[in-house]
Amino acid sequence: NEVTKLESQYKPIFSANHYVGCTGSQPSTRGFTCSVWQLFHYLTVQAARTEISQDPLEILQAMHGYIKHFFGCTNCAEHFQAMATKRKIWSTPNKDDAVLWLWAAHNEVNNRLAGDSTEDPLFPKIQFPSQSSCSGCYKQPISPAIMETNWDKNAVLSFLKNIHNPEYISRYGVEHEELLQPTIEKLRQKRMIGNVFSDMDMRMGMLLYVFCIGMMVIAFKLFAFKGYRKKPYGHDLLGKV
Ligand SMILES: Cc1cc2nc3c(=O)[nH]c(=O)nc-3n(C[C@H](O)[C@H](O)[C@H](O)COP(=O)(O)OP(=O)(O)OC[C@H]3O[C@@H](n4cnc5c(N)ncnc54)[C@H](O)[C@@H]3O)c2cc1C
């Protein structure tokens, strides 16, 4: 009820009705649970990028509460709560660590579910990010002898902040772009226009514009109201002859 109330109070809110980022290769895979992960990763990153709140647990606590009370998969919810206690969710010291806490927790779930029947064959459960998408996130090349990945957590943090930066997020499937923050491309175009034309240029341009309009009004008054004078043509004279 609260969500519905807020939705009508602040509408329009949603830029699209279907989140294409979590479309599975089969109807039974990905979808909602994938979107829940994506949403909370996005929120931890946004909290770390802004100064709106200094509470490092704001997003993790919201996620913990949501999973505990509303997540349809009871098994998943129990696993998540057990993992939260084991990984000391309530001791997360700052907002960057909250981003990394969720990343590491998600990787633990990925590890547990790798090869599971719920896995989408086109989206295998890997330790995220893959080496091909962020080689700098790995401190040393993965070898079969090393069981645990040696992560460069600073690089992982930058990678996560980058992929969840609203300016870079793909607009594919978006129906109401005006509800979103401008993309980096749009911002660049704006800045380019701003750089090419200085404030002075803009003011001069406006003056010229007003001057031209004024000239047009004067010209219209001078010529339009003096009546139509027929231009004498040679064939008129010849006709009279
Ligand atoms: C809290 C929670 C607990 C769950 N527990 C279970 C369970 O016990 N059993 C079960 O069968 N299913 C569980 N699920 C569902 C499962 O984790 C997947 O969401 C589902 O199988 C769909 O997988 P997916 O391939 O779309 O990728 P998902 O694992 O849903 O990931 C979505 C996207 O997030 C990104 N991503 C992947 N890993 C990371 C990471 N470490 N950090 C940041 N981004 C990442 C990738 O782009 C990926 O495509 C749980 C889901 C949630 C939200």
Image (cartoon, rainbow, N blue to C red):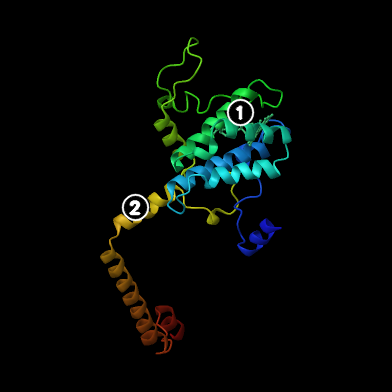
Q: Quadrant of residue 124?
A: top right
At x 73% / y 36%, what residue is drawn? 74
Q: Image quadrant of ligand 1? A: top right
Regarding mark 1 in the picture, which secondary structure is present there? helix
Residue 171 in sight here: no
Regarding mark 2 in the picture, which secondary structure is present there? helix
In the depicted view, which residue is nearer to us: 171 or 78? Answer: 78
Q: Quadrant of residue 173?
A: top right
Where does residue 209 sit, x and y in percent of width and height? 34, 72
What is the spatial separation of the Cα atoms under label 1 and label 2, in whole angstroms?
44 Å
How packed mark 1 is, by other alpha carbons closer than 10 Å (few <14, some 14-19, many 20 or more), is: some
Residue 117 in sight here: yes
Q: Is residue 116 above or below residue 94?
A: above
Type of the residue with mark 1:
Val
Residue marked by disc 2 = 192
Q: Is residue 4 above or below residue 116?
A: below
Q: Quadrant of the C terminus?
A: bottom left
How packed mark 2 is, by other alpha carbons closer than 10 Å (few <14, some 14-19, many 20 or more), is: few
Residue 109: give its label: 1
At x 51% / y 43%, what residue is drawn? 44
In the depicted view, which residue is nearer to us: 58 or 240? Answer: 58
Check the image and name the residue furthest to the top: 145
Where does residue 98 sit, x and y in percent of width and height? 49, 39
Left or right for 202, reference 41: left
Where does residue 50 sit, x and y in percent of width and height? 43, 50
Type of the residue with mark 2:
Met
Q: Is ligand 1 within 8 Å of the beta carbon of the residue shown at mark 1? A: yes
Check the image and name the residue furthest to the bottom: 226
